[in-house]
């Protein structure tokens, strides 16, 4: 059996609470989360030691120990991407397959540094939103897309990735500029891609399901609402990545997603003005 080590900001959070069981199921018991370390206890939840006891995971007293003992590594902290570079530093130097949870990095410069570190040390690594794996999105035709209109729940800072990642997976990583056109109640961002293609995202609060409307140059349109269990294929892909060391998400797409989020923040500070994205 292969072992997985968790590195987190604090362990009692939604992803860490579910990944161990999902990974065991997806790998047919060939892998298990065996070791964990986190920088602090959850402010409102189980302590790290209590989390480990509850989940049958061995607490270790340093990142070094997690990296040394584990065959594969997962850097979590899904809602605190500003912690990822620090938390992932030793993992990305290890040469062992590393999955870094969403949102990968707080900005483009950090994302590039992390990929460069992994490349220098021969460390296979990737990151993604689980929404990329929604069956409804994965089956959509990519050729001839003219416009995508996306809506979904949550706040821009930690949920925009779930709209932007599927857009990049369908349209590619070549967004050129962004304009904020929403308001405080419902942030909205218009991205322009090469050849005049456009993508609009809008966040409507927690009661709005994720939906993409895709308009094609042919005049046909498709409305895609992910009702499938996108976490199951996501976890299967993570297991496959650990087994093969081959990520399925292009680093250029991950860097593009983070760039679009970062420059979206800038656009929100200057509404109704185009903000150019770096090439």
Image (cartoon, rainbow, N blue to C red):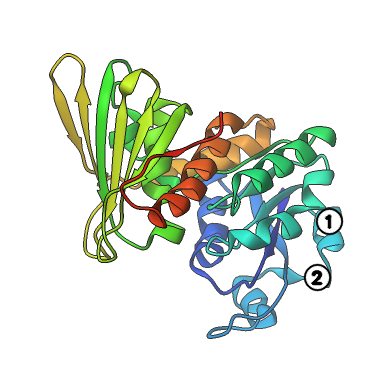
Q: Nearer the viewer, residue 279 or 71?
A: 279
Q: Residue at x 72, y 35 (%)?
A: 124
Q: Is residue 248 left or right of residue 244?
A: left
Q: Assess whether mark 1 and mark 2 are in contact (beta carbons under 8 angstroms).
A: yes
Q: Which residue is mark 1?
A: 69
Residue occupying image coordinates x 84% and y 37%? 121
Choose between 123 and 201: the one closer to the eye.
Answer: 201
Q: Is residue 44 above or below residue 51?
A: below
**Quadrant in the rendering for residue 88:** bottom right
Q: Quadrant of residue 241?
A: top right
The local secondary structure at tag 2 comes to loop
Residue behind mark 2? 60
Q: Position of residue 79 (x, y in %)?
A: 52, 64
Q: Position of residue 31 (x, y in %)?
A: 65, 49
Could you classify mark 1 by the number of other residues whose Cα lies within 10 Å: few (under 14), some (14-19), or many (20 or more)? some
Residue 56 vs residue 62, the one in the foreground: 62
Q: Secondary structure at mark 1?
A: helix
What is the number of callouts on the image? 2
Direction from residue 113 to residue 238 in the image, left or right: left
Residue 130 marker: none
The residue lying at 86 percent from left, 62 percent from top is 65
């Amino acid at each position: 059996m292969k072992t997985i080590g968790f590195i987190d900001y604090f362990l009692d959070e939604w992803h860490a609470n579910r990944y161990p069981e999902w990974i065991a199921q997806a790998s047919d018991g060939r892998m298990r989360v065996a070791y964990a370390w986190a920088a602090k206890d959850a402010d409102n939840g189980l302590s790290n030691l209590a989390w480990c006891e509850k989940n049958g995971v061995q607490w270790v007293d340093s990142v070094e120990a997690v990296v040394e003992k584990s065959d594969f590594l997962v850097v979590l902290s899904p809602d605190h991407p500003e912690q990822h570079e620090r938390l992932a530093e030793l993992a990305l130097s290890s040469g062992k397959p590393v999955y870094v949870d969403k949102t990968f990095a707080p900005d483009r410069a950090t994302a590039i540094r992390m990929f460069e570190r992994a490349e220098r040390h021969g460390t296979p690594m990737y990151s993604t939103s689980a929404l990329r794996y929604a069956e409804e999105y994965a089956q959509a035709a990519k050729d001839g897309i003219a416009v995508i209109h996306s809506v979904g729940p949550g706040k821009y800072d930690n949920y925009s990735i779930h709209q932007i990642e599927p857009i990049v997976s369908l349209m590619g990583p070549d967004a050129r500029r962004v304009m904020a056109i929403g308001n405080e109640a419902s942030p909205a961002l218009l991205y322009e891609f090469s050849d005049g293609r456009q993508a609009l995202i809008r966040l409507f609060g927690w009661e709005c399901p994720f939906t993409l409307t895709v308009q094609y140059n042919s005049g046909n349109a498709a409305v895609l609402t992910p009702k499938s269990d996108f976490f199951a294929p996501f976890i299967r892909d993570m297991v496959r990545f650990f087994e093969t060391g081959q990520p399925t998400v292009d680093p250029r797409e991950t860097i593009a997603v983070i760039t679009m989020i970062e420059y979206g923040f800038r656009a929100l500070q200057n509404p109704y003005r185009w903000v150019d994205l770096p090439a």
